[in-house]
Image: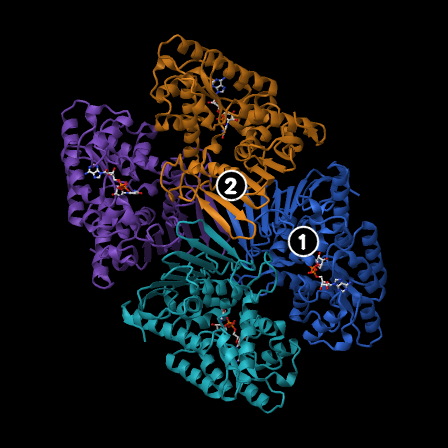
Chain colours: A orange, B blue, C cyan, D purple
Amino acid sequence: MVGGGRGSQIGYIHRSAAMRDRSFDLVAGAFDIDPARGAAFGAGLGLDPERCYRDHEALFAGEAARTDGVEAVSIATPNNTHYAIARAALEHGLHVVCEKPLCFTVAEAEELQRLAHGRGRVLGVAYGYSGYGTIEQARAMVAAGELGEVRLVNLQFAHGFHSAPVEEDNPAIRWRVDPRFAGPSYVLGDLATHPLYISEVICPDLKIGRLMCARQSFVASRAPLEDNAVTLMEYEGGAFGTVWTSAVNAGAIHSQKVRIVGSRASLEWWDERPNQLSFEVQGEPVRVLERGMPYLHPEALAEDHISVGHAEGLFESWTNIYGRFAAAMRATGRGDAATLAGLRYPDAAAGVAGVRWVENCVRSADAGGVWVDYR
Amino acid sequence: MVGGGRGSQIGYIHRSAAMRDRSFDLVAGAFDIDPARGAAFGAGLGLDPERCYRDHEALFAGEAARTDGVEAVSIATPNNTHYAIARAALEHGLHVVCEKPLCFTVAEAEELQRLAHGRGRVLGVAYGYSGYGTIEQARAMVAAGELGEVRLVNLQFAHGFHSAPVEEDNPAIRWRVDPRFAGPSYVLGDLATHPLYISEVICPDLKIGRLMCARQSFVASRAPLEDNAVTLMEYEGGAFGTVWTSAVNAGAIHSQKVRIVGSRASLEWWDERPNQLSFEVQGEPVRVLERGMPYLHPEALAEDHISVGHAEGLFESWTNIYGRFAAAMRATGRGDAATLAGLRYPDAAAGVAGVRWVENCVRSADAGGVWVDYR
Amino acid sequence: MVGGGRGSQIGYIHRSAAMRDRSFDLVAGAFDIDPARGAAFGAGLGLDPERCYRDHEALFAGEAARTDGVEAVSIATPNNTHYAIARAALEHGLHVVCEKPLCFTVAEAEELQRLAHGRGRVLGVAYGYSGYGTIEQARAMVAAGELGEVRLVNLQFAHGFHSAPVEEDNPAIRWRVDPRFAGPSYVLGDLATHPLYISEVICPDLKIGRLMCARQSFVASRAPLEDNAVTLMEYEGGAFGTVWTSAVNAGAIHSQKVRIVGSRASLEWWDERPNQLSFEVQGEPVRVLERGMPYLHPEALAEDHISVGHAEGLFESWTNIYGRFAAAMRATGRGDAATLAGLRYPDAAAGVAGVRWVENCVRSADAGGVWVDYR
Amino acid sequence: MVGGGRGSQIGYIHRSAAMRDRSFDLVAGAFDIDPARGAAFGAGLGLDPERCYRDHEALFAGEAARTDGVEAVSIATPNNTHYAIARAALEHGLHVVCEKPLCFTVAEAEELQRLAHGRGRVLGVAYGYSGYGTIEQARAMVAAGELGEVRLVNLQFAHGFHSAPVEEDNPAIRWRVDPRFAGPSYVLGDLATHPLYISEVICPDLKIGRLMCARQSFVASRAPLEDNAVTLMEYEGGAFGTVWTSAVNAGAIHSQKVRIVGSRASLEWWDERPNQLSFEVQGEPVRVLERGMPYLHPEALAEDHISVGHAEGLFESWTNIYGRFAAAMRATGRGDAATLAGLRYPDAAAGVAGVRWVENCVRSADAGGVWVDYR
Ligand SMILES: NC(=O)c1ccc[n+]([C@@H]2O[C@H](COP(=O)([O-])OP(=O)(O)OC[C@H]3O[C@@H](n4cnc5c(N)ncnc54)[C@H](O)[C@@H]3O)[C@@H](O)[C@H]2O)c1
Ligand SMILES: NC(=O)c1ccc[n+]([C@@H]2O[C@H](COP(=O)([O-])OP(=O)(O)OC[C@H]3O[C@@H](n4cnc5c(N)ncnc54)[C@H](O)[C@@H]3O)[C@@H](O)[C@H]2O)c1
Ligand SMILES: NC(=O)c1ccc[n+]([C@@H]2O[C@H](COP(=O)([O-])OP(=O)(O)OC[C@H]3O[C@@H](n4cnc5c(N)ncnc54)[C@H](O)[C@@H]3O)[C@@H](O)[C@H]2O)c1
Ligand SMILES: NC(=O)c1ccc[n+]([C@@H]2O[C@H](COP(=O)([O-])OP(=O)(O)OC[C@H]3O[C@@H](n4cnc5c(N)ncnc54)[C@H](O)[C@@H]3O)[C@@H](O)[C@H]2O)c1
């Protein structure tokens, strides 16, 4: 593991999800920008001190020199480092699980994708919300035509925790609003790519034709990075999409919602109530689908960790994703194309897609919120 | 009353709200496009058959000829007739309550406004959702600075009842998607103007600087009228707004929601749960405000019909609006400017504002969804 | 009308519901315990001063002396006066709508019932929540066997407004906790009889075999009257019921809920969201039924005041009940037994049933919370 | 581990929670009533085949013979076996985590408690819902007097999954309704003890003075075991409690709810939305507290696994409980009384309390639903 050290927001769930169900074992790391702190942290996790490295280069080199060296690495560092670390890892022949956004430009992202492909390695991206059974259910329902033709995709990830300039006192937030570390966007990349990826999972046939994006920096010091943005998307074939993302939606917790509207019915998913899915057939009563119920599609039940009624949470979703990463790595290792074809996980293409979407949004926004052809 | 005859959607609530609390008395009408049916309907309401007229012209002439003729008229006919009927009524010296949209063009709307002004008559518009105490509470909270500076205005009125081409079998829907009767828009004028007016009540200081609108006709035969639209608004001073309106949001009932996001807190109101208001201060627990509770601002309690806990509904909201129309007419009659200054109701200016907004949206949409300066 | 004067909690909704849809006209009253205040109040309502009487006796005598005297009276006074006023009204040959609880003892209630029967007059009781279309829907669903065999009836009306001894400063609350005015119970009679009556409407076949009741006075000065109580009921045939009623459920608004559990499915209704009904078939997704939707039983749609999506409230429910009172009075007047058989409204039998239930609860509670045979 | 083998409902969460955060390591087991299946299951978990034993006796003996033998055991077998297995484990000097109900009689439970005490071993009980941060918050709020004096405790765990006689086709349910395996009760012990324990955590000062219980077997073949029960409790000092538990609440998922009503405010917790807590101060807006927010008491934040907004679920709650079991075992091992005093976990006393409560309920119910002194 690279990054995810003491006090990091996301390190624990990576480790916990990866090790759950024995998908992975954690044996080495470069956990912190501060090597000493990283070493102490690794020791606290029970790692061999020799395998707590000063940085990712030392890690990859050191592990490559071992017969029992790591086969895969998780990258949970600030955005600006993803590209270099992921490239180095792939070049060392490692499978990679990288945080989102994968990198800053489509060019970089495609390079990583090519590299992974060329080396025969898995490059997974940590779209951790996508592992819920309710997302699988939504996907299966759309595929089965239960919504009719998809017309509208309404996406939202709009919290309020950065309504005030909280970055002034908090370094873990400060890098997020600094383009040198965060890249070309703040909330578009940090938040919106999550529901965007979920929409790609649920509606794999939708292709964006053109989009327009308006972004704002309500805390002025964040400019040019936005703390609020709205994106409109015209899909090929006539469907229409909207994305609202915000860090200044005062008082809101996550408000990550995905609503898919079809000609016959709609589906709505909300990450704060992830065990439920609202299914709304026009002319019929709204139905609340519950994770774990036998009436769901088999794919939605396949990764359940416990019977219905017992609340699953984000850790189970991440565990499912990490489980699929592991399965993909094993299948890749043995060249098992059939298994790979049946596996759905946020892969290099998903990473590229997220970076591409942000790039298009920024291009539109910087041109004054005009429609741009998606490229 | 003109229109609102047998089987009409909105006639009953006009009559019921107007006559509740003895604000108005119903004594004459031209209730139906079919005079015989209209006369029968009026008789059923207990009206003097002589005062059930064949059409609005006969009504205005006939009543003008009486010493006890009507002083005010409600117009609840399809959109295309509003302008002519309202103008005729004003020219006969009547106060007018007209359904929305007031008419088809800003030019017409301003003419009606001038006419009302010139004749010293009230011209009210039936934005009937705006009478809820919870709306008054929201207004008072914004005015008192309880949200901080307003940053975002998110508006929505998106039902799903016309997901299929139901107009084929239903004349009461057919006119709504026919530009000859509906005017230049369908859902923008029919639905979106409701939450738009509410946002104007809550945030009176916000002025739209420019907007862009994308509209779609998912049921193709409705083109050029839209059954779904998204509008983005840049307010002067930096606030940003979005409006989603739809008649193809399959499975949704009304989904009329108004969310105001400030630098310190947000408010959210939903017309399907009109007795509650969500107040979300960043960093504090979400609070659910309840109509009728003593902690509300006095304006929010002033028009309560019953103590807290007993569900009020749309009829109370309309009753409040009609009560204010009556008060405005009385005050106008006696030239009581002080009372008029203290009354807030959807007036001619609100009617103009709604028509203007639709006109700008259509102008943007028809130009390909580009930003247009608001005019 | 008797009672319901200035500042009274429930007078306005009586008048408003009775006069809506021209079911009744208000022409006379004895509105207040203070005759002068009552007269002023009546004048404010636009009544003929001569028909604003000093008390109910003067009212009944005065109206009897007129050729256009009232035919029916609504009684909205404190509980202790219901029996005498209702009896006097019936003896004067008037139809009566009386507030609940109808009186203090089953003996009195049965006497009123006999009197009404003997005189051929309607005696209605103001169980005003029972007029919602969603209640009709629930009744029709149970009748159609959609729940299977009814097993459990869970009733609740538990607010928190009297958590503190608020009666000390408020005369309108003080009488409610004083046995001389309130009768043998506080919350059992004041609150619990509402959902109890609703359960009788929904499940007309259930007969209580025995019950037990525990009651408490958390504000000690209220003893012997309870401010919280739990009642358990064994129905004949094996179903089981519970009733929780409270005025000290701190922070709760109304919490009036009715849950009917059958062998196949459950229904849940909540008076704070009266346009919805939760229908929960075992093994299927929970469904949220909406007032006004065509999938409802015809009885549930028959009294709709406006199309689906527009929130109806308690005023519509009361209007429906008053409309049925009027229909019953007209049918009684013309001896139309067929119409009467088809009308469902809270009648004298419902009034007796409520008083009986309270009497049994108090008997059980006063014996230490023991099971008592229902009588 | 004993029990929790292939297809068992609860085995996975025991293992997953125990091993998360490296609280425990799983090295040996007797996972199944069928030894071969148990061995295969253990092998699948990666265990040394030698340490996959044929039954718990072989396990305890085999491990005792090793220098690296287990120090603690989790028991996840049907109820009838808990007593014997737990006793044997304690006699072998092992710490024990046992499923609820701990055993069948208070006498047995107290014997286990004494044994654990005498041997200086931890005896924990798997009240796994009690580890949520929201429960800690509730406890801290009551302790700080934020509710005022506690008046009412309303507990509920009422699902509908056994509305039909599903046990006929499902052995994992069959034992639950067979007194030989389940003990003296079904839902009282299986479900109600969960919210009961939570209420003991939140309101440690409440002592039951007397209670009464009515139980029913709506699926008649389950008699004498109940599939529905209501218990009323008088606490010493005047507070009052109710418990509804059911397996025939058709259509309900879990409906495990805990409502604590105080003289000033109420709290409500619902296991299907475990990240929220409703805080309802009389006279103020209802507040929705969210896990992870800085306004919570420190105890409620101490065991957070991830920042606010990210949904935690039952696995995090169990992980917290297992983490406390581990801490208690370590502290017991080193005789660290100070640490033990600061640890709150479902211990032997909690196990005894649950069995005692069931015993009192059954005694009351079998006597016809009479009040019994708590003993
Ligand atoms: N998938 C999700 O839901 C999700 C949620 C939060 C964050 N993230 C992403 O995770 C990444 C990390 O975010 P975070 O919130 O945990 O950040 P953070 O600032 O809380 O933690 C970053 C960690 O990385 C370490 N680090 C920094 N540079 C390093 C380097 N060069 N080598 C080794 N370690 C280094 C830091 O010492 C720290 O431990 C970001 O890309 C962010 O976008 C994803
Ligand atoms: N404020 C709201 O919430 C709301 C809700 C629904 C409709 N509306 C508006 O109300 C108006 C009427 O809508 P509706 O749904 O009741 O329509 P509808 O088609 O159901 O009824 C229209 C009524 O007007 C009568 N009519 C038509 N032309 C007439 C004429 N020239 N003279 C007299 N009567 C005439 C018809 O016979 C019919 O009785 C529209 O402008 C609509 O936009 C407003
Ligand atoms: N159905 C419901 O939902 C509901 C709700 C609230 C109250 N109630 C019932 O309505 C009745 C009145 O309750 P309230 O809350 O309105 O009481 P209140 O104290 O607010 O008002 C009582 C009114 O009756 C008048 N009055 C008292 N004695 C009178 C007399 N002898 N003659 C004429 N007028 C008299 C008073 O002056 C006052 O105007 C009670 O029986 C109560 O249980 C029913
Ligand atoms: N804490 C909770 O939330 C919760 C939830 C469910 C069950 N439980 C409790 O957990 C226990 C197990 O319930 P379950 O639903 O998992 O049961 P189950 O029938 O699904 O599984 C029982 C497991 O124990 C094994 N087993 C049975 N007898 C054994 C023996 N003598 N030695 C070794 N293994 C044996 C079985 O082979 C099976 O693998 C019960 O006491 C139940 O009350 C608790």
- Of residue A70 and residue D240, the one placed in the foreground of this image is A70
- Secondary structure of residue under mark 2: strand
Distance from Cα at disc 1 to Cα at disc 2: 31 Å
Kindly identify which residue carries mark 1: B167
* Tag shown at residue A269: 2
For residue B59, side relative to residue A179 (left or right): right
> What kind of residue is marked 1?
Glu
Chain letter of mark 2 equals A
- Where's residue B34, x and y in %? 75, 67
Q: Is residue D323 visible?
A: no
Circles 1 and 2, Cβ within 8 Å, touching? The answer is no
Instruction: Determine whether the beta carbon of the residue marked 1 sits less than 8 angstroms from the nearest atom of ligand 2.
Output: no
> What kind of residue is marked 2?
Trp
Q: Is residue A348 above or below residue C89?
A: above
Q: Is residue D203 above or below residue D315?
A: below
- Where's residue B26, x and y in %? 71, 72
Residue A110: image quadrant is top right
Q: Is residue A197 above or below residue C92?
A: above
- Secondary structure of residue under mark 1: helix
Which residue in the rendered view is the most extreme toward the bottom? Answer: C65
Q: Is residue B120 above or below residue B197?
A: below
- Of residue A222 and residue B317, the one placed in the foreground of this image is B317
What residue do we see at 83% from left, 53% from top?
B108
Residue B306: image quadrant is bottom right
Q: Is residue A135 visible?
A: yes
- Of residue D269 and residue A165, the one placed in the foreground of this image is D269
What residue do we see at 27% from left, 43% from top?
D172
Residue density around tag 2, few if under 14, some if 14–19, many if 20 or more, within 10 Å: many
- Where's residue A77, x and y in %? 49, 21
